[in-house]
Amino acid sequence: MAKWVHSDVLDGGLNAIRGGAARMLLIKAYAAGDSYATVAGNAICTITMAPGDFTLSGAPGNPRVCTVAAKSGTASAGSGPAPDLHIAFTDGSAKVLWVTDETSDQVVTGGNTIGFPSITYTANQPI
């Protein structure tokens, strides 16, 4: 299961996600490091995001957590018969900021309602 974070997120921390993620996409396939064009081309549902959809938390000295609000949308296309679903966050034009697994990998039909769960990204303290 591929997972990946853009270097802007590693360099800029969780604020790079909160301030830069303009879109949340359900994608039907992903390989680590896929380009923005590939990720956008694999999108079967796209949701517009705003900084208020992301909450940062964590006590000093503990891991910081970015929690994404649950959202819903309508699938614009089908997933195909054997999808490897992922959720991707992009800036809407050129960068893939964060990709994580969508663990159900259920078949999606165009026009279906898609429920995106609340998900988290944790930035651990250095060891």
Image (cartoon, rainbow, N blue to C red):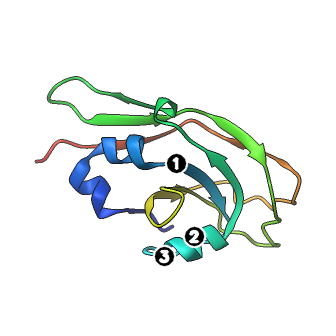
Residue type indicated by callout 1: Ala
**At which x and y percent is residue 124?**
24, 43
Left or right of residue 118, residue 27 in this image = right
- Disc 2 is placed on an element classified as helix
Q: Which mark is residue 58?
A: none
* Residue matched to label 2: 39
Kindly report which numbered mark, 3 or 1, lies closer to the viewer in this rendering.
1
Q: Between marks 2 and 1, how big is the CA–CA gap?
A: 14 Å
* Residue matched to label 1: 22
Marks 2,3: beta carbons within 8 A = yes
Q: Earlier in the sequence, mark 3 or mark 1?
A: 1
| Residue under the image location 75 percent in, 44 percent down | 73
User: Relative to 84, is 62 above or below?
Assistant: above
* Residue matched to label 3: 35
Residue type indicated by callout 2: Val
Left or right of residue 73, residue 39 in this image = left
Left or right of residue 15, residue 93 in this image = right
Query: Who is closer to the viewer here, 62 or 110?
Result: 110
**At which x and y percent is residue 9?**
31, 54
Residue type indicated by callout 3: Ser
Quadrant of the image occupied by residue 8: bottom left
